[in-house]
Every structure is written in C-alpha cells, then in structure tokens.
Amino acid sequence: MESLKSKKIGVLLGGLSPEREISLLTGNAVLGAMRKLGLSAEAIDVDRNIAATLKEKRIDLAFIALHGTYGEDGTLQGLLEYAGIPYTGSGVLGSALAYDKVKSKEIFKVNGIPTADYQVVYRSQREKIRRSIEGPVVIKPSNQGSSLGISIVKDEKGWEPALELAFKYSEEVLIEEFVEGRLVAVGMNGETPLPAIHIRPRSGFYDYEAKYTQGKTEYQCPADLDKTELARLNETACAVFRALKARGVPRVDAIIDSEGVPKVLEMNTIPGMTPTSLLPMAAKEAGLDFEALTLEILKKATRDYED
Ligand SMILES: Nc1ncnc2c1ncn2[C@@H]1O[C@H](COP(=O)(O)OP(=O)(O)O)[C@@H](O)[C@H]1O
Ligand SMILES: [Mg+2]
C-alpha cells in the first residue's frame, strides 16, 4: 500500500468499443475508490492517440477499466508492455485468448473444461451456413461483451435475424447449444475463487438491459448450490483461470445444467465494476469492500516481460 501511494496511477477508461458507457461507469467508480484510499490517480480517456498520451502523462501504473475491443483484448496490454508500464489484469496472450470466445472454447475442450456444444460460422460464408446443432441455440459474436449481438433462437424464424445481428459485431460467430440451467458467475482473486453468484434475470435472458438496470435481475450471493456443485464450479473456474493464462481478478461465467455440470460460457479479464456489477458483489461477500477490491486489483498489476 505504501509503495502504491508513491505511484502515479492512470485509470484508462472510455475507449473505442460499444461498451464505452459501461467502461466510464467502471472507471469512475474505481477512481472514487482510489481517492478514498489516498492514492494519486487520474482518468485517461483512451482514444487513437493513447500512445502519445501515455508518454506525456508519465504514469507509473495503469489500471485498465476498459471493456471490449482495444482494451480487454490484449492490444492495449501490448502497448503498455512496450511503454514499460505495469498494468492491471491479464497479460497480452491471456487477454487475447479470453476475449475470443471461439479460441477460449477450443482451449476449454483440450483441457477437459465443460462448455456448451457449438459450431462456428463466418460472415464470408453466409450463404453456405447449415446448422449442425439441434434444438434451441444461442447465436453470439465471437468477440464482444455485455450481451451485445447475442440472441436466443428457439424457432426457425428467429434464425436469420439472429445471424444478421451477430455478424454486425463480428466476422466470426458462434452458434451454441442453449443450456438450460442456473446462470452463475465466479470472480477469481488470483487463483482463489470468490463466493459464486446465482444470477436470475426477470426476463429469463441476461441481456444488456438486465445487466445494467437496477431491479431487472435478482442476484443471490453466495449462490444456493449444494456442496458438490459448488466444489465442481470452483474447480472449473480455477481450471479456466489457468488454461486461459489469466492474471489479476477476472470473472468466469457459466451455466450449471440439470446434471450439475458447470458449462463455461466465457471468462472476462476486466469484469465490470458498476453499481450493479457482479465482481464487487462477490468481493463484498468475501469481506472485501469496493476499495479493498480496487486495492487487490492494483496489487496484482504487473507486466509479461521484465527488463
Ligand atoms: N449457451 C447458452 N445457453 C443459455 N444462455 C446463454 C448461452 N450463452 C449465453 N447465454 C446468455 O447470454 C448471456 C451473455 O452470454 P456470454 O457468452 O457470457 O457473453 P457476454 O460476453 O456478452 O457476456 C449469458 O449471461 C446468458 O444469460
Ligand atoms: Mg458474460
């Protein structure tokens, strides 16, 4: 903590992705926490000039409060490596892998981590797409967050508009088996799982609105899971953390199916820290208030390479 007090911290926020608004909420909440902690921090809105801005600001440490492309995907992490500035969250490869849902799933499979059955389709082969997954599916862009571009498709007529929407966000699209079950999230404080959260959106679908509107979703933390289910979920979240080369305090999303199997949807390397966000809720249950959580994330800041 004392060593952090002597550092000039830059909170990188805003950015270029469609999740800009959420990033501003996360970043400003984190800035508030740093002020309360007596740390010297300033907001840096990330735009195409970020390399020049970093040079000019001379920060000692970067807290990355960005979600989505050009923030959560390894690109900014690469720039910070070059500039020699330690940063929060996962490194270049870990960020890139976790941000790509298709690559994540390939890695889950070779590591025996349960995940929903899927098929990958490309915009350039639009006419040739034949579905290979039976029954209800979820169609989503391979790289996006906040449920943007995601549709649940339960009948034939939903298929075309869902593909159309997902291709707006990404050239590569995932068609996943719809997993019926309990939606859960596990924050990871390094290799240690935080208490799991059971997420119950009133509409049934945890979409953008359900995620960020107060009262649209019910949360239960700690989740009402039996001992075996919880052990399996935590073990799986740890396996995801290692397999995707994560660092810091990420969050693993999964659906526990009727057989108690946690089918992993994804890992978020920079989880939201807005007033309705999951990670601060889980941290609180573990005895870490928002300031303590911010401090945990800062303490884990580092770089892939050392000079
Ligand atoms: N295979 C699936 N089966 C059922 N629901 C799903 C599935 N995939 C996603 N969802 C729903 O969509 C939400 C967002 O999906 P997710 O893969 O976590 O993407 P995002 O990066 O946008 O959060 C989930 O929280 C869940 O409610
Ligand atoms: Mg998610």
Image: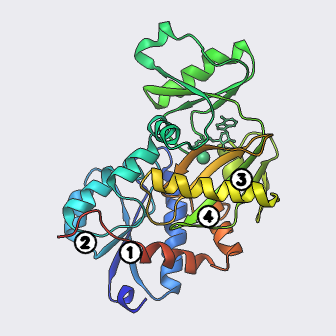
Eye-nearest disc, 4 or 2: 4
Mark 4 or mark 2: name the one nearer the start of the chain.
Answer: 2
Residue 3 left/right relative to 78: right
Q: CA distance from mark 1 to mark 2?
A: 10 Å
In the picture of the structure, the residue carrying the numbered disc 2 is: 57
CB within 8 Å, label 1 to label 2: yes
Q: Amino acid at mark 2?
A: Lys
The span from disc 4 to disc 2 (Cα, nearest Å) is 29 Å
Q: Position of residue 167 (x, y in %)?
A: 49, 24
Number of the front mark, 4 or 3? 4
Out of 149 and 231, give the one closest to the viewer: 231
| Nearest the eye: 226 or 189 | 226
* Residue 127 in sight here: yes
Q: Which residue is mark 3?
A: 213
Q: Residues within 10 Å of mark 1 (few under 14, many from 20)?
A: some
Q: Quadrant of the N terminus?
A: bottom left
Assign a secondary structure to mark 4.
helix
